[in-house]
Image (tube, helix red, strand yellow):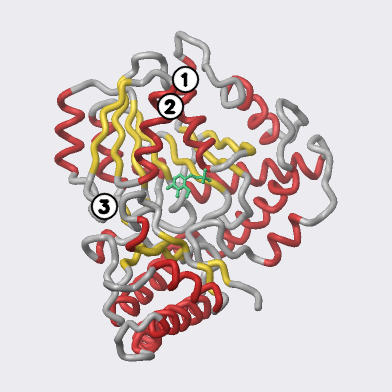
Amino acid sequence: GRKLLMIPGPIEFEPEVLRVLGAQTASHVAPNFIATFGNCIRSMRKIWQTKNGQPFIISGSGTLAMDMAASNLIEQGDNALVISTGYFGDRYKDILERYGANVTILNVVPGKTIEIDRVNDALKKKKYKLLTFTHVDTSTGVLVNPKPIAELAKKYNVLSILDGVCSVAGEEIKQEEWGLDIVLTASQKAIGVPPGLALLVVSKKAMSVWEQRKTLVSNYYCDWQNWLPIMKAYEEGKPSYFGTPPVNLIFALEKSLEIIVTEGIQKRVKRHQTIAAAFRRSIQSIGLKLMPISNNICANTLSAIYYPEDVNGGEFCAKMAANDIIVAGGLLPELKTIYFRVGHMGSVSTKDIVATLSAIENALKFVNYKFEFGISLKTFQEEIYKTT
Ligand code: PMP
């Protein structure tokens, strides 16, 4: 049958978005495409919750968004602080070092969040140009609270970069109010558009730090010098060209951002929270353990779940797929075989979770795990009834 994609990106996309994607390709200087691009820029400001931020919409994946932020802000020898809660924090260290940054990394045990005192101590000890952190760590399912970190960055006059690839349009973000300098993401997660777009919103302060660079940006494709005039032109309704934009994806982005704005960002975040909380309780009712050490640091866009002891992950995931539900294996190299991940973001609804829980129970029973058959479905039913 038709499989349900329950991984933490790419996700299931709205049929309307996919329909737009399949339409005839327009010229990248056609008036209707220029209008669409402008609409995307304006919708991004609403979703990121900023009035003055500069959006960038670029062809590429989330890693390109990380690369663009790093390459435009880092000059040889700059100090950068990386707060790493898992796989993608470690990747940010590699990216920053590639551009000549001196990186200090703050690590945590998988499943924990960062203690704010450690960030404060690090900022007190040394002067940094910027810090990076991951809002939702896709490798552990941990949700980091961005507000206190952004406040500390501001206090020490350090630029703050939030990797929101697994959070934007699913978790609460108030870029301007919280003082985040860059919030970056990609299209294939809670934004709800097939893979291929890197999306960033950059504060006035970060743009002025970039303007004051003494050296050229060493990544030609990423250089804001090339892209800023393009973003401005599209917003002003004028044709322009640097590199051909992914026209169809941008029409799809306009549609998906419109769906998000119409739902309302607060309502959308609430929906993610409600579904995630009910899913977690259901998973725990089977006796499974989540990777985050407590429920209040669990992401609302995905869950990382340990297999019960003696359960073979490969066998479990294969059985899930045979039941038409695709989940993701573990991502942290050292723990890969002992946990799996379920995405629940974007268009996700209770019917997707019911189907997923049913398949999880079926697969667990198949691999001889002992539990009360049906308990997670009953738990989910009760949790959802309470909130509707
Ligand atoms: N950061 C986070 C938090 C992510 O989840 C991902 C993708 N899983 C990335 C960065 C990298 O994005 P991409 O795979 O689109 O390059």
Name the residue rendered at 81%, 35% in the picture: 29
Q: Which residue is mark 1?
A: 210
Residue 228: x percent and y percent?
60, 26
Name the residue rendered at 20%, 37% in the picture: 119
Q: Which residue is mark 2?
A: 206
Name the residue rendered at 44%, 84% in the picture: 362
Name the N-terminal-most of marks 2 and 3: 3
- Identify residue type, mark 2: Ala
SS of the residue at dot 2? Answer: helix
* Along the viewing direction, whichever of 220 and 160 lies nearer the viewer: 220
Q: Is residue 352 above or below residue 342?
A: below
Q: Is residue 340 above or below residue 109?
A: below
Circles 2, 3 touching at the beta carbon (< 8 Å) = no
Q: Which residue is mark 3?
A: 110
Q: Is residue 335 above or below residue 89?
A: below
Residue 45 visible here? yes
Circles 1, 2 touching at the beta carbon (< 8 Å) = yes
Instruction: Find the residue positioned furthest to the top.
Output: 214
For the C terminus, which image quadrant? bottom left
Within 10 Å of disc 2 (Cα), the crowding (few <14, some 14-19, many 20+) is many
Q: Is residue 285 above or below residue 128?
A: below
- Identify residue type, mark 1: Trp
Residue 46: x percent and y percent?
52, 49
Residue 66: x percent and y percent?
47, 35
Within 10 Å of disc 1 (Cα), the crowding (few <14, some 14-19, many 20+) is many
